[in-house]
Image (cartoon, rainbow, N blue to C red):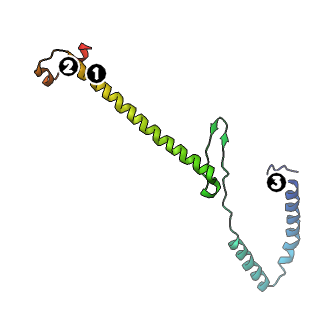
Amino acid sequence: MMKHPRKTRLELLADRQGLRLAAQLSPAARDLPHQVTERLRAARERALASRKLQPVRSEPVYNLGASLVLSGGNEESMGWLGRLSSGLALLLLVVGMLSISEAQNELRARELAEVDLALLTHELPPAAFADPGFLQFLQTVD
């Protein structure tokens, strides 16, 4: 007997019984009147048309090897704790982005203050500000 990894023994026995029954009915089906065969054909087509395929629902995966996967899901399955944690995560993200922006602005202001300090402490003629080599001069001073 051939092994099928996806079918259980009971399913295999049911399939075999169905094949035996079909083999016995096939010769008798040739002797049926035309009206009966047409009614059977129409009933078979209606049964196939009414059969709806169930959509495959994927289950959320929370841990996949060494990575963590967060599953979305629908609003009803989330609960109040899930909504609270999602809102908290969003709030932390916004606060983090604002603090990074503020830190970059502060760093830029300090760099500009250092340049201004260097300009004010060194004796420069006013024409130096219009000179294209002024940036090179600032680099040599530091």
The amino acid sitting under disc 3 is Lys
Secondary element at tag 2: helix
Q: Which residue is mark 1?
A: 114
| Nearer to the camera, 113 or 6 | 113
| Contact flag, marks 1 and 2 (Cβ < 8 Å) | no
Secondary element at tag 1: helix
Q: How many numbered callouts?
A: 3
The image quadrant where one finds the C terminus is: top left
Q: Earlier in the sequence, mark 3 or mark 2?
A: 3
Q: Is residue 81 left or right of residue 116?
A: right
The amino acid sitting under disc 2 is Leu
The location of residue 120, given as percent across then percent down, is: 20, 19
| Contact flag, marks 3 and 2 (Cβ < 8 Å) | no
| Nearer to the camera, 92 or 14 | 92
Secondary element at tag 3: loop
- Give neighbour class at mark 3: few <14, some 14-19, many 20+ (Cα, 10 Å): few
Above/below status of 101 relative to 45? above
Above/below status of 51 relative to 66? below
Q: Which residue is mark 3?
A: 7
The location of residue 124, given as percent across then percent down, is: 15, 17
Q: Is residue 44 left or right of residue 126?
A: right
The tag on residue 120 is 2
The amino acid sitting under disc 1 is Glu
Above/below status of 41 relative to 84? below
Residue at image location 49% in from the left, 41% down from the top: 93
The location of residue 26, given as percent across then percent down, is: 84, 72
| Nearer to the camera, 107 or 18 | 107
Q: CA distance from mark 3 to mark 2?
A: 86 Å
